[in-house]
Image: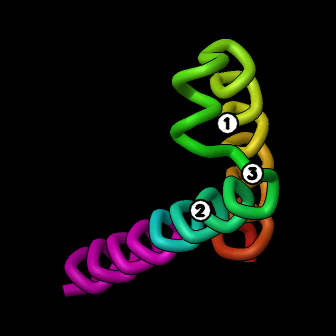
Amino acid sequence: MFKGRLNAYLADIDRQAQERFERLIKGMKQAQGITERLKEENAVEWTGRLNNIRACAREIVNEEIIQM
């Protein structure tokens, strides 16, 4: 019984973290002007900037949700 509740709780935390991660990335991309056009024109810059955003978003999610 406890294991079932724990699994449900962990699945919910995982879902919340993933949703927050995706929202952060979308917002940061918009704020920094990272577009599909940039991806087409300069894939290396686009990749570097997106990797930076993902790292920042991961840190935020870990602070806000994972390490509550």
Disc number placed over residue 64 in the picture, else none: none
Q: Nearer the viewer, residue 43 or 1?
A: 43
* Residue 15 x %, y %: 39, 72
Q: Residue at x 47, y 71 (%)?
A: 19
In the picture, measured across the screen, residue 26 lies left or right of residue 16, that is right
In the picture, measured across the screen, residue 36 lies left or right of residue 51, that is left
Q: Nearer the viewer, residue 20 or 14?
A: 20
Identify the residue under disc 1.
50
Quadrant containing the N terminus is bottom left
Q: CA distance from mark 3 to mark 1?
A: 11 Å
Please identify the dominant SS of the magenta region: helix
Give, as a three-letter code, the residue at label 3: Gly
Image: magenta residue range: 1-17
In the image as oriented, which residue stretches furthest toward the top?
44
Q: CA distance from mark 3 to mark 2?
A: 11 Å
Looking at the image, is mark 3 or mark 2 earlier in the sequence?
Answer: 2
Please identify the quarter of the rendering in which residue 2 is found. bottom left
* Residue 28 x %, y %: 73, 59
Identify the residue under disc 2.
26
Q: Which of the two marks, 3 or 1, is nearer to us in this view?
A: 3
* Residue 66 x %, y %: 65, 66
Disc 1 crowd, CA 10 A, few/some/many (<14, 14-19, 20+): some
Please identify the quarter of the rendering in which residue 10 is found. bottom left
In the picture, measured across the screen, residue 10 lies left or right of residue 37, that is left
Give, as a three-letter code, the residue at label 1: Leu
Q: Residue at x 28, y 80 (%)?
A: 8
Q: Residue at x 48, y 77 (%)?
A: 16
Give, as a three-letter code, the residue at label 2: Lys
Q: Residue at x 59, y 62 (%)?
A: 26
Callout 2: SS: helix
Looking at the image, is mark 2 or mark 1 earlier in the sequence?
Answer: 2
Q: Is residue 58 magenta?
A: no
